[in-house]
Image (cartoon, helix red, strand yellow):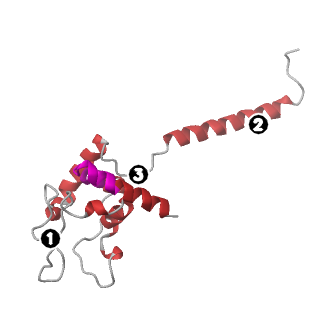
Amino acid sequence: MFGRRRGSGPIRAWLMAAAAMLGACAVTAAAAPAPLKADPDNAAQVALGKEVYDRNCASCHGAHLEGQPDWQQRKPDGRLPAPPHDWHGHTWRHPDRQLFGFVKNGVAPYSPPGYQTDMAGFAGILSDAEIWAVIAYIKSSWPEEFRRYQEGLTRRDEAASP
């Protein structure tokens, strides 16, 4: 009664293979990294961001996110000094995707033709995770009302993108 039925071997083998494939897919999905983003409430990401910022950004944007003096006045070469990234600057007026692009690709691709800038991109120098961490660190310094405003910009930008 509970013996092997004739022809059940190939079906059983197929079912076991299908179950193994589904299990492998589930493990792969569980192991897939979460989409990268800047989370100013993630202490580990903010700590990494501070380390990366200190090594790569502070020399221009200031050890305390304060930017260069007279950052809104053009230098003799026509370029603007590095702006602050604390709430005194305008960083909080850009959605995350744009901030990421500025760091990765530099400012020039997002500026009018001929715009001169000292902000070169960090593609090939910083990983995407490091860039998101720097953004998280910067955002963690903003007052709550500035963070909420910038989060709204980011949500609207994400909703509008394909």
Q: Amino acid at mark 1?
A: Trp
Which mark is drawn over residue 57? none
Q: Amino acid at mark 2?
A: Trp
Query: In the displayed structure, would residue 138 be above or below residue 19?
Result: below
Q: Which residue is mark 1?
A: 71
Front of the two marks 1 and 2: 1
Q: Which part of the image, by quadrant, shows the N terminus? A: top right
Left or right: residue 72 compared with residue 107 = left
Q: Residue at x 24, y 45 (%)?
A: 47
Front of the two marks 3 and 1: 1
Let me know if residue 22 is in the magenta part: no
Q: CA distance from mark 3 to mark 1?
A: 30 Å
Q: Is residue 68 visible?
A: yes
Let me know if residue 145 is in the magenta part: yes
Q: Secondary structure at mark 1?
A: loop
Q: Observer-nearest residue: 69 or 25?
A: 69
Crowdedness near tag 1: few (<14), some (14–19) or many (≥20) residues, C-alpha within 10 Å:
some
Q: Secondary structure at mark 2?
A: helix
Q: Which residue is mark 3?
A: 36
Q: CA distance from mark 2 to mark 3?
A: 38 Å
Q: Residue furthest top?
A: 1
Q: Residue at x 35, y 52 (%)?
A: 129
Which mark is drawn over residue 14? 2
Question: Which badge, 1 or 2, is on the more N-terminal residue?
Answer: 2
Bounds of the magenta span? 134-150
Q: Observer-nearest residue: 18 or 83?
A: 83
Q: CA distance from mark 1 to mark 2?
A: 67 Å
Q: Observer-nearest residue: 101 or 89?
A: 89
Image spot of residue 66 (x, y percent):
14, 60
Query: In the displayed structure, would residue 38 be above or below residue 81?
Result: above
Main SS of residues in magenta = helix
Image spot of residue 22 (x, y percent):
65, 38
